[in-house]
Image (cartoon, helix red, strand yellow):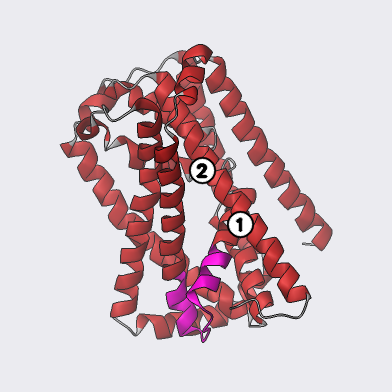
Amino acid sequence: MSIGKKKRTRVLRGVMGLAVSGLLIWWIIGRADVAALGGALAGTRFGWLGLAFAMFGAGLALAAARWSLPLGVSGFSESGAFVLRVACVGHCFNMLLMGPVGGDIVKAALYARWTRGSGAKTLAACAIDRLLAGGGSIVYGILIVLLIVFCGGMERLASLQLTGPAWRGAAILAALAAFAVWMFRARLLGNEFLRQSWNSFREVFRQFGGSRRLPALGVALSLLNQIVWTSVLAICLVAVAGEDVAWGETLWVFPIVSTVAALPISVAGAGVREGTAVLLLRTCDVSAADALAAALLTSGVYLAWAAVGALIAWREEMVFSAGGEASS
C-alpha cells in the first residue's frame, strides 16, 4: 500500500469515526428532553468532575506502568514519567485512529523516535502490552458477568423493552462493529511494519514469558486500569445526579457501557457511550437526562486527556527537534 493511500485511509477512518459519533449524539439528543439535559449539565458538581478527570489520569498511569514491563524486557530504560507522557500521547492517537491498533503503531514510532531506539522493539513491547490488556479483559469480563448476576442485572436486562428506533440503533452498532473487525483485519494483514516486527516480538515474548511475576503483574495492572476507567462514568453520574444513586442496582451497568464504548467505531466512544448509558441506566430508575449528561461529561474527560496528549506530543517533538533529551 502506497504512503498516499495509507494517508487517505487514515483520513477516511477519522472522518467515519467523527461521522458515527456526530450522528449518534445528534440522534440521541434529538430524542432527549433538552431542557432536562441542560438542567442536569448546569447542576454539575465540578469537584466530582475534577475527580473523574483525575481518575482517568490514574488509569493512564496504570496503563503506562503495564507498558513499562515489556519495555524494560526490550532493553529500554527511560523514566516512568516519560513512559507516562508517551502513553498519554498514545491515548490521543487511540482516539484519532479509533482504537489501540493504530494508536499503538504511532505510540511505538514516537517512542522510538524520541529515544532514538528501535521501532521494531517498541512495537513488539506494544504487542505484549496488548496481550496483557487482553488477559486483564478476560478477568474483567468474568467480573462483569458476576456483577450482572448478583446486582440484579439479568432481571433488568430481561425487562428492557427496545422500541423500533432502539432496535435500529442496535442493528447499526452491530453492523459498525462487524465493519471495524474487517477493517482492522485488513490493516494487520497489509502493514509491512508489523510483519517486520515479528522477530522482535518473538524475542520479547520469549523473555517476558520466562518470568512468572511479570505476566501476572501486567494482567493485574490491566484489570486495575479497566476498573479505574470504568469508574469515570460512575463519578460523572454522581456529578450530575448527586449521591442518591442506588449503587447496588447500577454497578453492573458501568462496565458494560465502558466495554461497548471501547468498540473502534467512533471517536473516544462518543455517541456509543451515550446511547448505551441511557438505555441501561433507565432500567435502574436513573433519568435519561442524568444518564445522558453523565455520559457526555465522560466523553468530555476522554477528549480533555486527548488534548493533553496532543500538547505533550507537541512539546516532546519540539525538545527532540532542538536536539534535547526527551526521556528525562
Q: Residue furthest left?
A: 150
Position above or below: 221 against 168: below
User: What kind of residue is marked 1?
Assistant: Gly
Residue beneath disc 1: 309
Residue beneath disc 2: 301
From this viewpoint, is residue 167 visible? Answer: yes
Q: Is residue 269 magenta?
A: no
Position above or below: 291 against 32: below
Q: x and y percent of residue 176 in the render? A: 56, 37
Packing grade of label 1 (10 A; few <14, some 14-19, many >=20) is many
The quadrant of the rendering that contains the N terminus is bottom right
Identify the main secondary structure in magenta: helix
| Residue 111 placement: quadrant | bottom right
The quadrant of the rendering that contains the C terminus is bottom right
| Disc 2/disc 1 C-alpha distance (Å) | 12 Å
Q: Nearer the viewer, residue 81 or 106?
A: 81
- Circle nearer the N terminus (2, 1): 2
In the image, taking residue 110 as reference, residue 242 lies left or right, namely: left
Q: Which residues are magenta?
A: 67-87
Packing grade of label 2 (10 A; few <14, some 14-19, many >=20) is many
Q: x and y percent of residue 21 in the render? A: 60, 34
Helix, strand or loop status at disc 1:
helix
Position above or below: 246 against 322: above
